Amino acid sequence: CSGNTVSSEDHTCGTGKVLKANASSINGSLEGACCDAACSAHYCASGYHLKASAAAIAGADDSTCCDQTKCSGNTVSSEDHTCGTGKVLKANASSINGSLEGACCDAACSAHYCASGYHLK
């Protein structure tokens, strides 16, 4: 499948597939023999998202292909939670599982009205 003396004879896997880990020891060039499903073809369960390098990882399950979604600091930044108006991410947001406003965000001081004689920090 791979590692041939003439590299043009190496097999190239199709979309959603990656070479098996032992591809250089497999004779032939059939897709089924040379390739495994790539994580990029896997759908993660709710609360999880594909790893950033999913297209290069062989696998078809959450434990291999997915990372748990956190409030912030996810491997895929588009999975990070954006707090609504008057809210800021909690200081430990990158260690909180989930993406719900209540779990991820605190009220911002800018949303607070100070008593007479006081001002916002």
Image: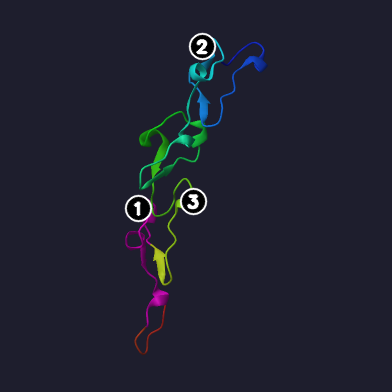
Residue bearing mark 1: 98
Tell me if mark 1 has few (under 14), some (14-19) or many (20+) residues whose alpha carbon lies within 10 angstroms of its own: many
Q: Secondary structure at mark 2?
A: helix
Give the vertical position of 14 relative to 25 (above or below).
below
- State the CA–CA distance, disc 1 to disc 3: 14 Å
Q: Quadrant of residue 101?
A: bottom left
Where is residue 81? Give x, y as percent: 42, 57
- State the CA–CA distance, disc 2 to disc 3: 38 Å
Residue bearing mark 3: 77
Q: Seen in the image, is 96 located left or right of residue 4? A: left
The label shown at residue 38 is none
Instruction: Identify the image quadrant of the N terminus.
Output: top right
Where is residue 117? Give x, y as percent: 37, 89
Q: Are marks 1 and 3 in contact (CB under 8 Å)?
A: no
Q: Are marks 2 and 3 in contact (CB under 8 Å)?
A: no
Q: Secondary structure at mark 3?
A: helix
Tell me if mark 2 has few (under 14), some (14-19) or many (20+) residues whose alpha carbon lies within 10 angstroms of its own: few
Q: Earlier in the sequence, mark 1 or mark 2?
A: 2
Residue at screen point 53% across, 9% down: 27
Residue at screen point 49% across, 51% down: 77
Q: Which residues are magenta?
A: 90-113
Q: Amino acid at mark 2?
A: Ser
Q: Secondary structure at mark 1?
A: loop
The label shown at residue 25 is 2
Instruction: Identify the image quadrant of the C terminus.
Output: bottom left
